[in-house]
């Protein structure tokens, strides 16, 4: 069964993942311009992009456990998934900067004064070097350091989940589910576990 | 009523732009003479009511879900007829009042008010309703009463949102008695001349236009006159974020975002932020009630 799925996946070209992944924000933007995101499209667009980024990061984090525990091989899509997640985070940030806050002086004040913004920005900054080095040349150039560098995605995704948890009003379930899933996926990587299943 | 608030703002009454600019020049001149305080309420130039669809599709009513469109999707199942309001505490005539009986005693009028959410968005809403003071006078307020407490309906079988402890149910809010008796304070029963849609707090809700929207409690089933500051839901959830007063104040930020500006709903994807007005533009009507109070402490 898994072999069949893996064989099928081998025939899916990576560019199709990029294509579908990039269509999503274009679709949201189209909805926002045409009233499809409701009467307050800025907040909705901001939220949708943020959540999409978090979902994509979770998918990226699931690839290794899926292969290790289920034998499902998605490795060849991992770079596309990571790059798309970064694109979503970047667009989320841009919507916040340009459409939502608008006032430059307030942007900096928010980053410094509002802990949930600080946490979100920190997550973005951690992802930045990963996006920059997401090409073959960097992988070759950096060698083993590349693997170590890309472990920064672990703290980055945690910051993303905490950012979501911190910004909601009242006790809400959804950000807690994201945090639980992310913590679970990170726990699967703890050294003790790896030895047990090696 | 000794001091009824006169609604001088109607849809046909919006100050033409040219006249507004002239008035600003006049005010600037008066400021030079130290007379700016007699300039009156804030500019009425943008008091164009939001569309029915905007007001009824973008709501916070967590009993029906935390998404902005959840109330419009889920509130239809709330039974609003019959509807009874328990009025108790320090009143001369406590009891359970039928909503229709209350209505028959009240004069319904239209009030076009600014509405400023604590989340930094705003609308202009043409409410229909009666002054809370009229209702309180109908039941008779006893001498020792200092505060008015309100409670929203809690009916889990009709409210999918209360399955989750988003805040402590039922939703509660409160006002100081002078705030409750202020002529601006409205008990809304309608919108655009139609009965209030369920998602907007049918059949009876509070509207306190100079306070953040969450003070304007929806679907009220209980009103209690007390001598102590009553518990208020968001204040109970996080007192450092949501004060009991929660007057609109551009100089006191919410810990997680600035309150200096707001975005009026309906401007689309490229809507500009506009400055938030002190007491949401009702400073001349309400500032007197807070004289001598440190508004950054009693936020």
Image: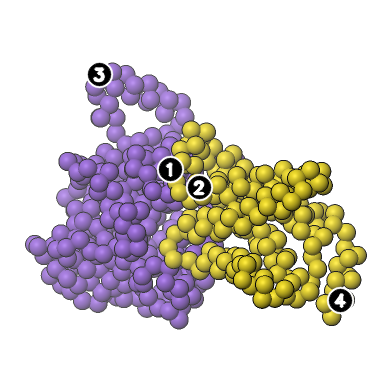
Q: Chain of mark 3?
A: B
In the rendered structure, are the residues bearing label 1 and label 2 in contact, judged by CB atoms less than 8 Å apart? yes
Of callouts 4 and 2, which one flags the residue occurring earlier in the amino acid sequence? Answer: 4
| Quadrant assignment, res A3 | bottom right
Residue nearer the viewer, A22 or B84:
A22
Judge whether residue B173 can be spotted in this image.
no
Query: Dot 1: what SS?
Result: helix
Relative placement, left or right, of B107 versus B266 is left
Q: Which residue is mark 4?
A: A3
Residue nearer the viewer, A4 or A48:
A4
Residue nearer the viewer, A36 or A161:
A161
- Residues under labels 4 and 1: Cα distance? 52 Å
The residue positioned 58% from the left and 50% from the top of the image is A123
Relative placement, left or right, of B186 versus B1 is right
In the rendered structure, are the residues bearing label 4 and label 1 in contact, judged by CB atoms less than 8 Å apart? no
Q: Nearer the viewer, mark 3 or mark 4?
A: 4
| Quadrant assignment, res B96 | bottom left
- Residues under labels 4 and 2: Cα distance? 44 Å
Q: Position of residue B3 (x, y in %)?
A: 19, 48
Q: Position of residue B97 (x, y in %)?
A: 26, 75
Identify the chain drawn in purple: B
Mark 3 crowd level (few <14, some 14–19, many ≥20, 10 Å Cα)? few
The residue positioned 45% from the left and 46% from the top of the image is A114
Q: Which residue is mark 3?
A: B33
Question: Where residue A113 is drawn, which disc sits there?
Answer: 1
Mark 1 crowd level (few <14, some 14–19, many ≥20, 10 Å Cα)? some
Q: Nearer the viewer, mark 1 or mark 3?
A: 1
Query: Dot 3: what SS?
Result: loop
In the rendered structure, are the residues bearing label 2 and label 3 in contact, judged by CB atoms less than 8 Å apart? no
Q: Is residue A56 above or below residue B292?
A: below
């Amino acid at each position: 069964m898994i072999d069949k799925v893996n064989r099928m996946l081998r025939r899916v070209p990576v560019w199709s993942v990029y294509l579908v992944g990039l269509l999503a924000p274009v679709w949201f933007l189209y909805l926002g311009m045409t009233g499809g995101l409701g009467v307050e499209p800025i907040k909705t667009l901001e939220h949708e992009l943020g959540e999409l980024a978090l979902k994509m990061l979770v998918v990226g984090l699931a690839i290794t456990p899926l292969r290790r525990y289920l034998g499902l091989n998605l490795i060849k899509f991992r770079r596309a998934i990571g790059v798309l997640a970064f694109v979503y985070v970047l667009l989320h940030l841009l919507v916040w900067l340009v459409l939502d806050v608008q006032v430059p002086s307030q942007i900096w004040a928010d980053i410094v004064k509002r802990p949930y913004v600080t946490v979100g920005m920190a997550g973005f900054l951690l992802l930045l070097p990963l996006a920059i080095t997401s090409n073959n040349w960097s992988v070759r150039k950096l060698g083993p350091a590349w693997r170590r560098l890309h472990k920064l995605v672990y703290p980055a995704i945690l910051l993303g989940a905490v950012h979501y948890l911190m910004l909601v009003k009242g006790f809400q379930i959804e950000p807690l589910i994201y945090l639980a899933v992310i913590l679970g996926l990170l726990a699967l990587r703890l050294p003790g576990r790896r030895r047990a299943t090696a | 009523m000794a001091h009824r608030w006169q609604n001088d703002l109607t849809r046909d009454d919006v100050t033409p732009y040219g006249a507004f600019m002239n008035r600003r020049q006049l005010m600037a001149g008066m400021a030079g003479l130290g007379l700016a305080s007699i300039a009156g309420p804030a500019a009425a130039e943008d008091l164009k009511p939001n569309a029915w669809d905007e007001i009824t599709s973008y709501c916070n009513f967590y009993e029906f879900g935390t998404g902005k469109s959840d109330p419009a999707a889920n509130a239809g199942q709330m039974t609003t007829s019959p509807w009874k309001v328990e009025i108790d505490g320090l009143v001369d005539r406590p009891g359970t009042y039928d909503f229709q009986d209350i209505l028959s005693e009240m004069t319904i009028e239209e009030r076009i008010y600014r509405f400023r959410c604590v989340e930094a968005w705003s609308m202009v809403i043409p409410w229909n309703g009666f002054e809370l003071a009229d209702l309180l006078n109908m039941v008779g307020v006893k001498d020792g009463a200092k505060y008015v407490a309100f409670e929203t309906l809690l009916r889990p079988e009709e409210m999918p949102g209360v399955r989750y402890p988003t805040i402590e149910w039922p939703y509660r809010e409160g006002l100081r008695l002078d705030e409750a008796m202020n002529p601006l304070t409205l008990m809304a029963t309608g919108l655009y001349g139609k009965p209030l849609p369920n998602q907007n707090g049918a059949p009876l809700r509070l509207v306190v236009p100079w306070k953040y929207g969450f003070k304007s409690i929806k679907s009220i089933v209980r009103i209690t006159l007390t001598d102590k500051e009553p518990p208020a839901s968001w204040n109970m959830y996080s007192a450092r974020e949501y004060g009991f007063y929660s007057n609109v104040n551009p100089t006191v930020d919410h810990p997680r975002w600035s309150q200096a500006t707001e975005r009026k709903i309906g401007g689309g994807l490229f809507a500009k932020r506009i400055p938030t007005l002190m007491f949401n533009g009702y400073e001349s009507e309400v500032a007197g009630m807070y004289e001598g109070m440190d508004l950054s402490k009693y936020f």
